[in-house]
Image (cartoon, rainbow, N blue to C red):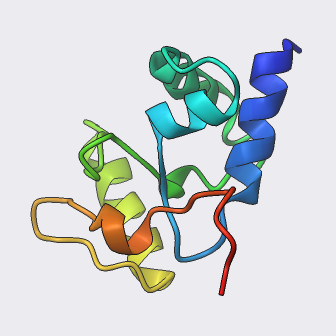
């Protein structure tokens, strides 16, 4: 497994319940700021195998990016079960819910 892929998996696993990260944010923390699409590919191909909390990943606008209707609704339900407010348009308030691994939790 490539080092970037390993780092992406580590970051995704570390996202706490009730928080989200963006694809681009994960790519930056994994050392490749322009690799958001690579994060999407890793998430798509490895979520089940590695039991990743895939539902905690959103796009840069804080929106659910899934096109599959069933998975879209599953992501909303999973986020809501963790206490994350999701608008009717599938948007999440990043100021409130975005997790920064470098920030000190109070």
Name the image quarter holding residue 68: top left
Is residue 10 found left or right of 72 in the rendered image?
A: right
Q: Residue at x 76, y 22 (%)?
A: 5
Q: Position of residue 81 (x, y in %)?
A: 47, 83
> Is residue 99 or residue 52 the one in the foreground?
99
Q: Residue at x 52, y 69 (%)?
A: 19
Q: Position of residue 92 (x, y in %)?
A: 28, 64
Name the image quarter holding residue 59: top left
Please, which residue is most extreme toward the left here? 89
Is 19 rendered above or below residue 32?
below
The number of numbered badges drawn on the structure is: 0
Where is the C terminus found, in terms of image quarters? bottom right
Q: Residue at x 44, y 86 (%)?
A: 83
Q: Residue at x 31, y 52 (%)?
A: 72
Is 43 rendered above or below residue 97?
above
Is 26 rendered above or below residue 14?
above
> Is residue 24 or residue 86 the one in the foreground?
24
Where is the N terminus found, in terms of image quarters? top right
Q: Position of residue 102 (x, y in %)?
A: 68, 56
> Is residue 55 or residue 62 the one in the foreground?
62
Q: Position of residue 98 (x, y in %)?
A: 45, 62
Is residue 4 found left or right of 95 in the rendered image?
A: right
Answer whether residue 58 is visible to the viewer in this image.
yes
Is 23 rendered above or below residue 63?
above
> Is residue 29 or residue 87 the one in the foreground?
29
Answer whether residue 50 is visible to the viewer in this image.
no
């Amino acid at each position: 497994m490539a080092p970037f892929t390993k780092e992406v998996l580590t970051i995704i696993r570390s996202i706490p319940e009730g928080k989200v990260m963006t694809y681009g944010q994960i790519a930056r923390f994994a050392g490749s700021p322009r690799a958001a699409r690579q994060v999407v590919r890793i998430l798509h191909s490895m979520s089940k195998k590695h039991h990743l909390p895939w539902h905690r990943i959103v796009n840069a606008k804080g929106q659910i990016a899934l096109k599959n209707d069933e998975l879209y609704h599953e992501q909303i339900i999973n986020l809501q079960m963790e206490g994350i407010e999701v608008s009717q348009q599938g948007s999440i308030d990043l100021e409130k819910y975005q997790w920064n691994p470098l920030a000190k939790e109070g």
